[in-house]
Image: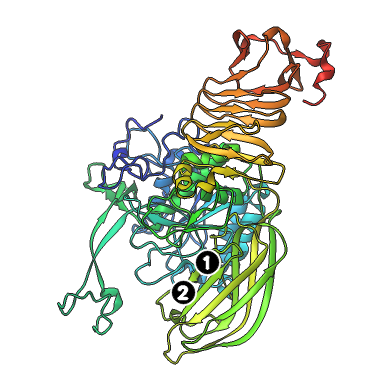
Amino acid sequence: MATPVNDPLFPTQWYIENTGQSGGTAGIDLNVLQVWPDYTGRGVTVGVYDQGVEKNHPDLIANVNPSLFMSAQPFGDGQPTTDSESHGNNVAGVIAATHDNGIGLAGVAYGATLGSVYLDLSVHNQYPDDLKAAYDFAAQNLDISSNSWGISNNFTNFNDADNRGAAQGIDNAIANGRDGLGVVIAFAAGNNRLEGDNTNLSNFANDPAIITVAGIAHTGATASYSTPGASILVAAPTQNIIYRNVDTDGDGVPDSQEKGEPVPETRALVEVARVGNITTTALMGRGVTESGAPGGDYDMEFGGTSAATPMVSSVAALMLEANPKLGYRDVADILALSARNTDTSAQWTINGASNWNGGGMHVNNDVGYGLVDALAAVRLAETWTSQHTAANLVSASATNTVNQNLPDGGQAVVTRFQVSKALNVEDVQVTLDMEHPNVSNLSFLLTSPSGTVTSLLDTPLPLAFPSNPFSMSSTHSLGEKSTGTWTLSIQDKSADGASGRIDSVGLTLLGSTGTLPYVYTNEYAYYAAQNPARTVLNDSSGATVLNASPVTNASTVNLLPGMPSSIGGTPLTIGANTNVVQVYTGDGGDVLVGNGNGALLSSGRGNDLIVPVTGSATLSGGPGLDTAAFPADQTDYSFLNLGGKNVVSGLEGSSTIQGVELLAFRGSIVPTAGLTFLPAESDPNRTALAQV
């Protein structure tokens, strides 16, 4: 394990290693320390889209690339333009402050290369062409775009002229960035929960191309101010703000519950304290010193989803170093599949997927799929074999003409979509052409064919629905099947004299075709205990991929018919009709047993045992001392090199081996490095290798 030894502020960075030092719960952190020995973000470029980054900050200069600095406005060079613009430095330090340099702190991806795209956050919504240029810059120069900002006006609509340029730039970045793999774009969910904001009020926060990030406090609960919404994918650590209720008339009933008190809703709560602050870099000389004195280069009170977003960008950088071939959609899927539930007392939906820990995934409008887990995400990235990009994005869409009034305080208007095109859902987008003077009266509920019910928008803000068609989105159906009936229910719940009309509703499902991997994480034991049906893997695809690489305890996967398996110690039964063709396990001392069907058995880290049994197989070890076991004497086998691959061939079959240190035979164990693997033509029995 690599931990900084001389970064003096590292002990305050609970988001990297939470020991309870900030008063929170130990373990509520990014789980990144075990990643650092292998990956630090090296070779990955992260653009900070913000108020500029100082090129010469002593804790950033080693990772800054000045050629990746630009301004989205017609002035500046990507650095701050005033002495109050510290926000970009705050974000940059979270990502890539220099590790182990004797000053300051360590960034989450401290080996990544930093770029800066300056935005004048006071007027950015007036510059659609400038925002287009900003994301066009990402398409040409960056791997990741980290955005800790948001549009202040509600119902920010990519169909409006002011925002079309930004939408075009984002589309360019995901379609053409990273040589077609797509720029990974992370956006902050916002800090306006108490005001009633929702991520589905802005296309910047609900575009399916974007990873929307919420905040989690150091206790594991949702940060008190973090804006909710169905478009949130994951969350990351951040500062929490503690509030108390206001009771103006002293009757013991808080203003937030007493409708008759003449007090604005914004005065219903008063801030008491900020806890779990985020330590990072500040403008040089405008922050505090490492001892907390004024006039230093650091900020020990950063927070908001502005702090959470660069953490997700950093984890994405670690993932891209581990597997540079990931598409931007793969990054999003992996982040969700590996995220953790850190608050079991919260309200969660278990969606209709079947490939996560034996069943559906946990998700809600507060934190999406949960707290990002760097170690689990990187392990999945290492073993991920698909490549999902803009070019192979599959969609199914339909538009229903409604032409119906939405009665004031009346019955819901329900529209249904029958989808026959089969795909694995990643995102759902609903586009509404309607009018209503006050959306705070309305509920928008989407039900998938699997029965997942998602609240697309629930806000107390008295906003008129936009005049141009407006799109909302949901991440909640990740992994579900598209086919069947999708139902949207829109209801005016308040009889206040305000009615509306719905002209049309469009549904777009985005995703992929083919077979999804069956992913197991350290949460398998918990959810299997809740639902024992999760302990049986039945898949009729004929090409099942079992990926337990995020699991840190020892697993046993036995592909022989009727033999028991376990994931991290929790039983798993592989159904008789399930043909597993790839197995990946994690960091424990694992045992993998094949069945002669040519499966890939990849044991990951740890001291593992791999047994091909009969037939053909590919045996792949990883860091640690791995052993491949064969049933006969060593002299009964040929050791061959076929096209650069080492093959052990015997009467029971032939196995390709890679990353395996020891070979065990009947009566002997020999180091793989001590064997000579000869070209196939030197073996008189080479015809037996035709199927390898």
SS at badge 1: strand
Estimate the x, y position of residue 520 in percent, counting from the top left.
53, 42
Task: Name the image quarter holding the N terminus.
Answer: top left
Front label number (2 vs 1):
1
| Badge 1 amino acid | Val
Local packing at callout 1 (Cα closer than 10 Å; few below 14, some 14-19, many 20+) is: some
Q: Quadrant of residue 565?
A: top right
Estimate the x, y position of residue 18 in percent, counting from the top left.
33, 42
| Badge 2 amino acid | Asn
> In terms of depth relative to the viewer, which is nearer, 362 or 614?
614
| Outermost residue, bottom side | 497
Specify whether residue 348 is in view.
Answer: yes
Q: Quadrant of residue 240?
A: bottom left
Determine which residue is flagged by label 1. Answer: 453
- 174 relative position to 79: left or right: right
The first of marks 2 and 1 along the sequence is 2
Q: Residue at x 42, y 74 (%)?
A: 459
